[in-house]
Image (spheres, helix red, strand yellow):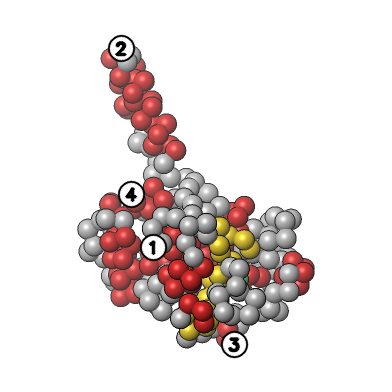
Amino acid sequence: MRQNTVKRALVAFALALPGAAIATVVAAPAAHADGCYTWKRDLYQGRSGDDVRQLQIRVAGWAGRGGIVRIDGDFGPETTAAVKRFQTAYGLRSDGVAGRQTFTKLYQLQDNDCTPAHFSYRELDDGCGEGGWSGGPVSATDTKATAVRTMWKLEALRRGLGDKPLNVTSGFRDSNCNKQVGGASDSQHLYGNAADLTSGSRSLCEIARASRDHGFSGIYGPGYAGHDDHVHVDSRRENNRDTSTNRTSWAAPDCGVSR
Ligand SMILES: [Zn+2]
């Protein structure tokens, strides 16, 4: 978005200049969509590849009640349904085909560092204040990539809550940090696969209930031990390293959320 603003400013500037200067600016390469990823073809059911995988990461928060979108590079019915929900949520034609309109919206939502517009690496990195992505059970690279997937779901949740700010009070925790805060020994926070949330404008129960629609398979909130002051969300079903946690687990009894 920032690049577009700069480009618009340049064009406006050029219009005030003699013809030769205008030609120079107009002939410059079109602004790259963004610095993270650019799709080069329309995507729809049946297509596969890394471009599908990149799309899946960004629409996984539109999985629908209790669902997940597998990040597998194969555009199947789950992905079609998620793209449709994404399109509806942003006022686009809901046809389940990711084409120019859908990609343009994703570029608008995406920062050059691949994080969605309203969340940043700084908010999700090491929760005990040291920063960074190392010190967990998997590599820093994998942890950071998982945190990006978490952030795209948070972006969808935020949209689902009416574009109200969500605060992340704890994201990735390295092993020491996780012990320090009394986290579960197999906590999804260790993988960058979880976030603890509060909001100044939505109740914790509103967050917990809405989270069911945005691809989160672990949700804990008010009424569940230790979760009366935040809502924990994670994507345990996608984290296949530990099969004991590879299932949906929701508990926010004070909000009527259980599974
Ligand atoms: Zn948590």
Kind of residue at disc 4? Thr
Circle 1 — which element? helix
Residue placed under numbered mark 2 in the picture: 18
Task: Please report contact status of discs 4 and 3: CB closer than 8 Å, yes or no.
Answer: no
Q: Nearer the viewer, residue 209 or 22?
A: 209
**Ligand 1 placement by image quarter:** bottom right
Where does residue 227 sit, x and y in percent of width and height?
A: 61, 74
User: Mark 3 or mark 1: which is in front?
Assistant: 1
- Mark 4 to mark 1: distance in Å? 20 Å
- Are there few (<14), some (14-19), or many (20+) residues within 10 Å of tag 2? few
Please, is residue 216 above or below residue 90 in the view? Answer: below
User: Mark 2 or mark 4: which is in front?
Assistant: 4
Circle 4 — which element? helix
Dividing the image into 4 quarters, which one contains the N terminus? top left
Residue placed under numbered mark 3 in the picture: 244
Circle 2 — which element? loop
Q: Nearer the viewer, residue 56 or 222?
A: 222
Residue 104: mark in rendering:
4
- Is the C-beta of the residue carrying label 2 under 8 Å from the nearest atom of ligand 1? no
- Mark 3 to mark 1: distance in Å? 30 Å
Q: Nearer the viewer, residue 5 or 26?
A: 5
